[in-house]
Image (cartoon, rainbow, N blue to C red):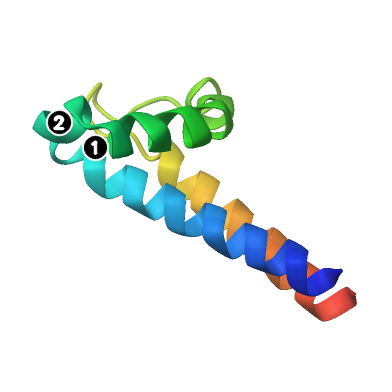
Amino acid sequence: MLSWIDLLLTLYGFCLMMRIMLSWLPELRKYSLANGLEKITDPYLLFFRNRIPTIGGILDLSPLFALFLLQGIQTLLRQFL
């Protein structure tokens, strides 16, 4: 069962990284892949965006914290289960 959870967390982390990269290219938001990634990742990212303020009103570091937490959880699961 751990391998399935690990695989799901890895895939979700990949989706988060893709979402972060797509945020640098806003013209790609019109494609269905970008919309799908937003629907999958935005609930998780909004948790962090509501708690971590932007730096100077421009730089949003919440996706970075979201990715670090996800990878930390994955690392803990690998060590203890």
> Does residue 19 appear left or right of residue 25 in this picture?
right
Q: Which quadrant, please, contains the C terminus?
A: bottom right
Q: Residue at x 47, y 26 (%)?
A: 49
Q: Residue at x 24, y 42 (%)?
A: 22
> Does residue 50 appear left or right of residue 31 in this picture?
right
Q: Could you tell me if the residues under marks 2 and 1 are in contact, i.e. CB atoms within 8 Å? A: yes
Real-space CA distance between mark 2 and mark 1, rounded to the nearest whole angstrom: 6 Å
How crowded pointer 1 is (Cα within 10 Å; few <14, some 14-19, many 20+) is rated as some
> Does residue 25 appear left or right of residue 70 in this picture?
left
Q: Which mark is residue 26?
A: 2
Q: Residue at x 38, y 40 (%)?
A: 61
Amino acid at pointer 2: Pro
Residue, far left = 27
Residue, far front = 32
Q: Residue 59 placed where, x, y %?
A: 26, 34
Q: Is 74 located above or below residue 21 in the figure?
A: below
Q: Is 73 located above or below residue 76 in the figure?
A: above
How crowded pointer 2 is (Cα within 10 Å; few <14, some 14-19, many 20+) is rated as few
Q: Residue 27 placed where, x, y %?
A: 9, 30
Q: Residue at x 44, y 50 (%)?
A: 15
Q: Which mark is residue 23?
A: 1
Quadrant of residue 70 in the image?
bottom right
Taking depth in this image into account, of 78 and 3 the one nearest to the observer is 3
Q: Is 34 located above or below residue 5 in the figure?
A: above
Q: SS at mark 1? A: helix
Amino acid at pointer 1: Ser
Number of dots carrying numbers? 2
Taking depth in this image into account, of 14 and 77 the one nearest to the observer is 14
Quadrant of residue 57 in the image?
top left
Q: SS at mark 2? A: helix
